[in-house]
Amino acid sequence: AQKGWPTLSGLTPPPNPDMGDLGFPCFPFARVARMAPVQIAQELVGQLEADSLIAGFSAEGPYVNIQFRPQAVASIVVQEALYQQLQQ
């Protein structure tokens, strides 16, 4: 992270599950970026790309929400559980 930039420590589930699986507020970035949190969220969503784990991103007001691909998440959980089982 660049000096002075906040981290993404505010990741939380959105209040409405239809919004996504995780979200983070853009308020902490407003002072450093000198932009409104709503504008920051919209710009971030425009620059982020889906991949094999993440199905997409959406801006809901000053929040960026993340939608995961359920099958990819399940695969990671199963792999981690099997790995932990082998370590015992």
Image (spheres, helix red, strand yellow):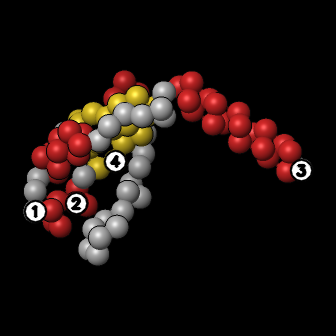
State left or right for residue 50 relative to residue 30.
Answer: right
Q: Amino acid at mark 3?
A: Gln
What secondary structure is found at the residue carrying circle 2?
Answer: helix
- The numbered mark, 2 or 1, whose residue comes first in the sequence reads 2
Residue 12's image quarter? Answer: top left
- The numbered mark, 3 or 2, whose residue comes first in the sequence reads 2
Residue 51 in sight here: yes
Residue drawn at the location 48% of the way across and 27% of the way down: 69
Q: Estimate the x, y position of residue 45 in percent, counting from the top left.
A: 24, 40
Residue drawn at the location 29% of the way across and 75% of the way down: 3
Mark-to-mark CA distance, 2 and 1: 8 Å
Q: Estimate the x, y position of residue 73 in percent, counting from the top left.
A: 57, 32
Q: What is the quadrant of the N terminus in the image?
A: bottom left
Say if 31 sits above or below 58 in the image. Answer: below
Density class for disc 2 (Cα within 10 Å; few <14, some 14-19, many ≥20) is some
Q: Are marks 2 and 1 in contact (CB under 8 Å)?
A: no
- The numbered mark, 4 or 3, whose residue comes first in the sequence reads 4
Q: Are marks 4 and 3 in contact (CB under 8 Å)?
A: no
Residue drawn at the location 25% of the way across and 61% of the way down: 28
- The numbered mark, 3 or 1, whose residue comes first in the sequence reads 1
Residue 20 in sight here: no
Which residue carries the number 4 mark?
24
What secondary structure is found at the residue carrying circle 1?
Answer: loop
Mark-to-mark CA distance, 4 and 3: 36 Å
The tag on residue 34 is 1
Which residue carries the number 3 mark?
88
- The numbered mark, 4 or 2, whose residue comes first in the sequence reads 4
Q: Amino acid at mark 2?
A: Phe
Density class for disc 1 (Cα within 10 Å; few <14, some 14-19, many ≥20) is few
